[in-house]
Image (spheres, helix red, strand yellow):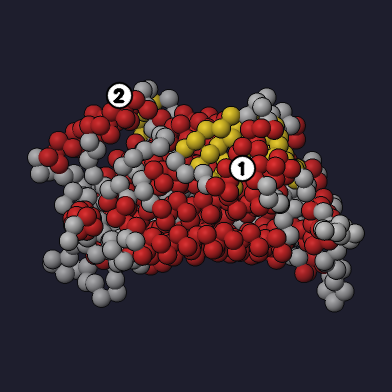
Amino acid sequence: MDMKVAKKKLGIKERYGHMTRGLGWEPTYQPADAVFPYDKYEGIKIHDWDKWVDPFRLTMDAYWKYQGEKDRKLYAVIEAFAQNNGHLNITDARYLSAIKLFWQGVSPLENYVVQGFARAGRHFRGEASRVACQMQAVDELRHYQTQAHSISNYNKYYNGFHSQRHMWDRVWYLSVPKSFGEDALTAGPFEFLIAISFSFEYVLTNLLFVPFMSGAAYNGDMSTVTFGFSAQSDESRHMTLGIEAIKFLLEQDPANVPIVQGWIDKWFWRGSKVLALVGMMMDYMLPKRVMSWKEAWEIYAEENGGALFRDLARYGIRPPKGWADACEAKDHISHQVWLLFYEYGGAAAFHTWSLTNEELDWLSAKYPDSFDKYYRPRLEFLRDKHARGERVYQSTLPTLCTTCQIPLCFTEPGDPTKISHRETVYEDEKYVFCSVHCQEIFCNEPEKFVQSWLPVNQIYQGNCFNPDVDPTAPDFDPLKAVLEYFKYNLGRDNGEFEGSEDQRNFAMWRGQASKN
Amino acid sequence: MSKVFIIVQANEEARSIVEALLQDNPHAVAQESPAMVRVEAEGKLTLKRATVEDLTGQPFNIQQLHVNLISISGHIDEDDDYLTVEWAN
């Protein structure tokens, strides 16, 4: 017969209390301000660090247990994927462009966030906040590693997955997420927390990991959907950290409210620009589409973000300044970014292509207010030219926004026919922006943003050629020299999908999968 | 009132979580997408340990939710016997 055990186990709340409180001490060899030199200069006032509570009340022991379980499940899938030629089950090799872009441009950001949280976990004074930041640093490292392991299966067979670290520091479009990550990493620890945990994780990452990963499942990519959802289960905790962090800062001192509001304005806008890449992946790169970027934006940004900002109104927080413009852009950005990459397809380490009539019809139905009027005619025009053997490739270099580093391809709020363009002169130098919000971010921190490493400007200054190149040689081809500096395998990594090696190999191997 | 949601993977372990949510929150709705299930409700959603245990006949720790959780919205209140998400507006 079972006996009732008399000794009662600690409940979640008690366990959390024991494992996150009373772990610190008052330093005596050095003043506390010398031990924690970075948690005051941003102007944030904290009176009681013990008010910080992780609502999930996850402690280190439970953390390792559940993370271990998640990893075992994930690696079983990765192994099965590798052993059973899982790469041949995806809908179409065009799908791989989305995974290439994810690997080139999103995975390295995970590594930046590891560094950021390791640093925040060192520099906050409160123990519970440090425990939470350290767990998140370990999570993000896991994300980078699981992405590397999952995607390495594709690297065995397809182009464009190699040289990620090299490309990250050089390639023009990768400077968009890179500059976002470096801006956050070089901010103070509180701004970093609002940038990543709140603006990015809480308000925006659902757009990246939920509909896009469901899209990966819909396109037969067992490996990506598994690492995506495995990462997203951590993101649920990160989002909770984000909302907890903001409540904590706002409740500690009313003087924190305007500082936090400024960071929300800045980082919501920066995040929404980086996610334009995801909009393009969802609307254009998934051969089978789950939902449009616009629908995802409405559910996860407008509805969920709207609920959040209604909730924060009691602290005196309003929705971010760029909110209305970002919501209006849901009808446009995925198309504008795709057109940019299509035309600069020679300079991207993934493929672009012409859409079929069926795909154009899907977009017409999903974007009744914008697609037929502004984008379908341009896509059909480009497709006709390609059919006549005149595939369009831009060979000039675009103007980049000094803040978000995206080429000026977005249009004015209220006028989708006019490219949005702003300029500011700072210390006799002219700086260009894609929007009034990016301009404002620059003007608030000009000393930081004058240091932006803008790839196009660097190319024109001659800083993006391999050392053995002679730009004065009579047959010098500057564009080719730049792509070699990026370490592209020319003609294999870049350009049109139709006729590409990836297209041919996928078709051939898939054929072999069903017969001898 | 604003909507809250809990999204879990579409798998056997999470099926009982979805069923428990629908049983204990009559105003909740489940939407299925490839590989995931989104349970959403106006205002508030509660997951109860006892309901999941009744459905599966096995012990369930509320924190086991983490293994199959994809996303969640609202303020969270978690204890040994329940997890609630709620907006204060």
Position of residue A424 in the picture relative to residue A477 (left or right): right
Count of numbered circles in the view: 2
- Report if the CB atoms under discs 1 and 2 are less than 8 Å apart: no
Q: Nearer the viewer, residue A345 or A236?
A: A236
Q: Nearer the viewer, residue A459 or A340?
A: A340
Amino acid at the residue labelled 1: Ser
Taking the spot 79% from the left edge, 53% from the top edge, the residue there is A12
Q: Chain of mark 2?
A: A
Query: Pointer 2: residues within 10 angstroms few (<14), some, or many (20+)?
Result: few
> Which residue position is annotated with label 2?
A373
> Which residue position is annotated with label 1?
B16
Q: Is residue A107 above or below residue A381?
A: below
Q: Quadrant of the N terminus of chain A?
A: bottom right
Q: Quadrant of the C terminus of chain A?
A: bottom left
| The residue positioned farthest toward the front in the image shown | A1
Q: Is residue B53 above or below residue A226?
A: above
Label 1 – label 2 distance at C-alpha: 47 Å
Q: Secondary structure at mark 2?
A: helix
Q: Is residue A331 above or below residue A453?
A: above
Position of residue A373 in the picture relative to residue A26 (left or right): left
Amino acid at the residue labelled 2: Lys
Taking the spot 14% from the left edge, 35% from the top edge, the residue there is A384
Residue A201 visible in the snapshot: no
Any mark on residue A394, and which?
Answer: none
